[in-house]
Image (cartoon, rainbow, N blue to C red):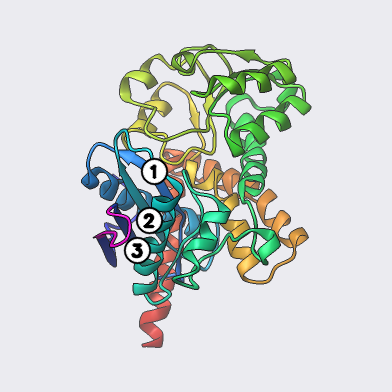
Amino acid sequence: MSAIPDFTHERVLTSMGARSDVVITVALHSSVLGPALGGCRMWTYPTWADGQADALRLSSAMTLKNAAAGLDAGGGKAVIALPMGTHIDADRRRAALLDLGDLVEALDGRYRTAEDVGTTEHDMLVVRERTEHVVGLPAENGGAGEPAGATALGVYSSIAPTLEEAFGSDDIAARSFVISGLGQVGGRLARMLAGHGATLFLTDIDGRKQQLADDLGATWIAPGEALTTPADVLVPAGLGGILTDEAIEALPVRAVVGPANNPLAEHSGAARLAERGIVYAPDFVVNAGGVIHLQGMADGMQWPAIAERLTGISDTLRGVFASARQRGITPLEAAEALAAERIDAARGHMTVSA
């Protein structure tokens, strides 16, 4: 059972795009801590309802992420659900982004969108033609720019406390890592770890990424071997839901820490990992670097102050591990409790003010 209360989504808008004929969902989960922040995912789904369900799941995860990161921002998410096998050309892509802008605008500033899987910072310029409630615009247009570097730095900052928890030492050079997914974040993280002497096993569904493995002196493995390759640490850096009960039972690692959202197929997976003695660093704590960067830029913070908050993710994670040990719960439950405490405090303040 999750430690966070059973919140209902404040608003969910699902619409067939008038210009694009694509189903788009904007899910506002919570604005208790402030206007919601969460990216727009453009992906293929078996049905539009699967896209909507993804938006609901991802938006609630954003509430946890932003709260645990100490941001004055709620949780939301947008999903542009493309039918399976769809190739979206430039004109229809632009149309879908304009349709998204209309839905975001309808929420009157309670939700701010940004790039996510399948969208880019330049896509956000199109969305901005219909609404001002967009963050993560290109740097050359006065925006925060690509947040992947900040996300990668936050994940890297999470490695040390995870190694300490699992092995009693944060010596990266003494450890082996499987990185599954070599996109903007996974690729950056691989370079960081290689630079500190880690032994790396790398994989991605895009075979062209093998060049990165060659460049770093890493071992390339097939995507299907990511969960069965013996190593010290698994770093999920692609899409979520990969850690099913069956995968966890056979997982040959001592720790899991990475940027992928919702890597656990089921919430109960956290307890299964603990039973097997595998340290799990909660994803929404680890991968909060992107939203910390976006919110910081929106608040007018300079990079040194933002970088300090990014490296501070390590302290947050150490606190989560300590709380889990003290309370006899999983790190996931401890992280959820941390987020819930912030939200409950904000609710109490709102009640008193009212």
Q: Secondary structure at mark 2?
A: helix
Kindly indicate whether the residue at mark 2 contacts the one at mark 1 (C-beta within 8 angstroms).
yes
Quick check: 62 left or right of 200?
Answer: left
Q: Residue at x 70, y 61 (%)?
A: 140
Kindly indicate whether the residue at mark 3 contacts the one at mark 1 (C-beta within 8 angstroms).
no
Q: Secondary structure at mark 3?
A: strand
Disc 3 marks which residue? 28
Q: Against 16, is 311 above or below?
A: above
Which quarter of the rendering shows the C terminus?
A: bottom left
Do we see residue 215 in this rendering?
A: yes
Which quarter of the rendering shows the N terminus?
A: top left
Q: Which residues are magenta?
A: 15-21
Disc 1 marks which residue? 88
Q: Against 62, is 229 above or below?
A: above
Q: Main secondary structure of the magenta part?
A: loop
Q: Residue at x 39, y 84 (%)?
A: 352
* Lower position in the chain sequence, tag 1 or tag 3: 3
Quick check: 26 left or right of 190?
Answer: left
Q: Given this view, does label 3 or label 2 mark the residue nearer the observer?
A: 2
Disc 2 marks which residue? 96
Type of amino acid under label 1 = Ile
Q: Residue at x 43, y 72 (%)?
A: 346
Q: Is residue 20 magenta?
A: yes
What distance separates the C-alpha of mark 1 from that of mark 3? Answer: 26 Å
Query: Which residue is nearer to you in this view: 95 or 138?
Result: 95
Q: Quadrant of residue 231?
A: top right
Do we see residue 8 in this rendering?
A: no
Q: How far across and down, in percent of the image, does residue 86 sit? A: 33, 38
Type of amino acid under label 2 = Ala
Q: Is residue 227 magenta?
A: no
